[in-house]
Image (tube, rainbow, N blue to C red):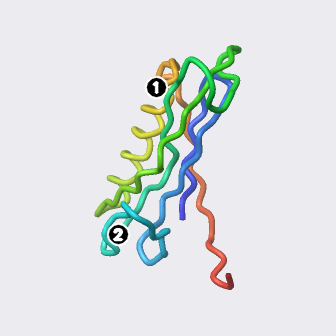
Amino acid sequence: MLMVCGCAGDTELTGTLYERGERAPSFEGAPNEDAAYVWVCDEFYEVDSGGTSQQVDGREVHLAFESPMPRGFDTRDQAVENAREHVRTQFARIGVDPSTVEFNIEKVELDTDL
């Protein structure tokens, strides 16, 4: 699997990209098991009060989280580009310029003994 991490505004967001042959989480709303690549990441937006407090660009932001919406893709290139776009969108939703997001993508081996 790949961990896709976007950093901007002195904070970061990381999602998981399950690759062909890996078992992605199965839950309501998960993509068809036949999807070669499955992206799973938090979705959130800024609220005036309540939620979870986070420091972003030196200011306190209150976040409300939505249920993750897994997405399936046919190719790795499609999956990675859509993962990047998803992360940029989440930053934009809390007032961070999406063009400032820097990415790190790391391959992580699944522990098959679990």
The residue under the point 53% across, 39% down is 65
Report crowding for label 2: few under 14, some 14 to 19, many 20 or more residues within 10 A (C-alpha).
Answer: some
Q: How many marks?
A: 2
Assign the C terminus to one quadrant of the image.
Answer: bottom right
Residue in the foreground of this view, choosing between 15 and 101: 15
Q: Which of marks 1 and 2 is nearer the N terminus?
A: 2
**Residue type of the residue flagged with mark 1:** Arg
- Residue found at the far front of this picture: 50
Horizontal and vertical percent position of residue 51:
62, 31
Rendered image quadrant of residue 5 = top right
Q: How crowded is mark 1: few (under 14 residues within 10 Å), some or many (20 or more)?
A: some
104 on left or right of 30? right
Q: Distance between the residues labelled 1 and 2?
A: 29 Å
Q: Which residue lies furthest to the bottom in this view?
A: 113
Q: Which mark is residue 93?
A: 1
* 60 with respect to 64 (left or right): right
Q: In which quarter of the image is residue 50?
A: top right
Name the mark on residue 68: none
Q: Which residue lies furthest to the top in this view?
A: 59
Residue 103, placed above or below residue 30: above
Residue at the spot 63% in from the left edge and 35% down from the top edge: 12
Question: Secondary structure under badge 1?
Answer: helix
Report the residue marked by disc 2.
36
Q: Position of residue 73 (x, y in %)?
A: 31, 60
Residue type indicated by callout 2: Ala
**Of labels 1 and 2, the one closer to you:** 1
The answer to which image quadrant residue 31 occupies is bottom left
At x 37%, y 59%, the residue is 76
Kind of element beneath mark 2: loop
- Counting from the top left corner in percent of width and height, residue 72 is at 34, 60
Taking the image as shown, residue 54 lies to the left or right of residue 42, namely: right
